[in-house]
Image (cartoon, rainbow, N blue to C red):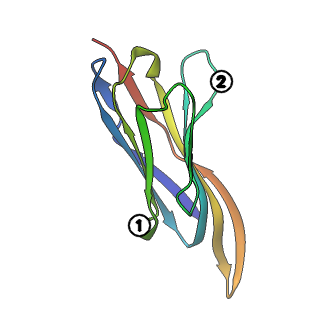
Amino acid sequence: QVQLVESGGGLVQPGGSLRLSCAASGSIFTINAMGWYRQAPGKERELVAGITSGGSTNYADSVKGRFTISRDNAKNTVFLQMNSLKPEDTAVYYCNADGYYNFYAGVHKYFDVWGQGALVTVSS
């Protein structure tokens, strides 16, 4: 089916930058929206940024102007460029994608999958 593999998490000082990547693999027919969510300790998972197949984006108010989401449709990959990081950005970041995969000969099935998570720690 479809899997998402994330990379790019780590430890960064306040004010620093990180770039997360998430690559989708499998028998993909098409990917609709891709997005990044995060979950801090003791808090619920929240949407950070999303991007449609056509490139339309949306962001959480807390990251607007600091984070940029982009995607490479040819490589089924989504990125999250995070600048001016703050301690409150510390969380596990998850990517998500939905779309259709090739089930068999001309038949496609819907998928909605999550990556394994990437820890981002912002601390001095």
Task: State whether residue 46 is above or below residue 75.
Answer: above
Residue type for callout 2:
Glu
User: Which circle marks residue 28 in the picture?
Assistant: none
Query: x, y (%) of residue 78?
Result: 45, 53
Q: Secondary structure at mark 1?
A: helix
The answer to whether 36 appears left or right of 12 in the picture is: right
Query: x, y (%) of residue 36?
Result: 53, 41
Q: Are marks 2 and 1 in contact (CB under 8 Å)?
A: no
What's the residue at 69%, 86% (across, down)? 106
Q: Nearer the viewer, residue 63 or 97?
A: 63
The answer to whether 67 appears left or right of 3 in the picture is: left
**Looking at this rendering, what residue extends furthest in the top direction?**
124
Q: Nearer the viewer, residue 122 or 54?
A: 54
Residue type for callout 1:
Lys
Q: Secondary structure at mark 2?
A: loop
Task: State whether residue 8 is above or below residue 109.
Answer: above
Query: x, y (%) of residue 8?
Result: 33, 40
Q: Nearer the viewer, residue 65 or 52?
A: 65
What's the residue at 44%, 52% (across, down)? 70
Q: Quadrant of the C terminus?
A: top left
Give how far apart the Cα atoms at labels 2 and 1 are: 30 Å
What's the residue at 46%, 16% (across, down)? 88
Pointer 1 residue: 75
Task: Decide: few, some or many residues near mark 1? Use Cα within 10 Å; few <14, some 14-19, many ≥20.
Answer: few
Task: State whether residue 48 is above or below residue 76.
Answer: above
What's the residue at 39%, 28% (across, down)? 120
Pointer 2 residue: 44
Query: x, y (%) of residue 6?
Result: 42, 46
Task: Decide: few, some or many residues near mark 2? Use Cα within 10 Å; few <14, some 14-19, many ≥20.
Answer: few
Label 2 vs 1, first from the N-terminus: 2
Q: Nearer the viewer, residue 113 or 123?
A: 123
| The quadrant where residue 97 appears | bottom right
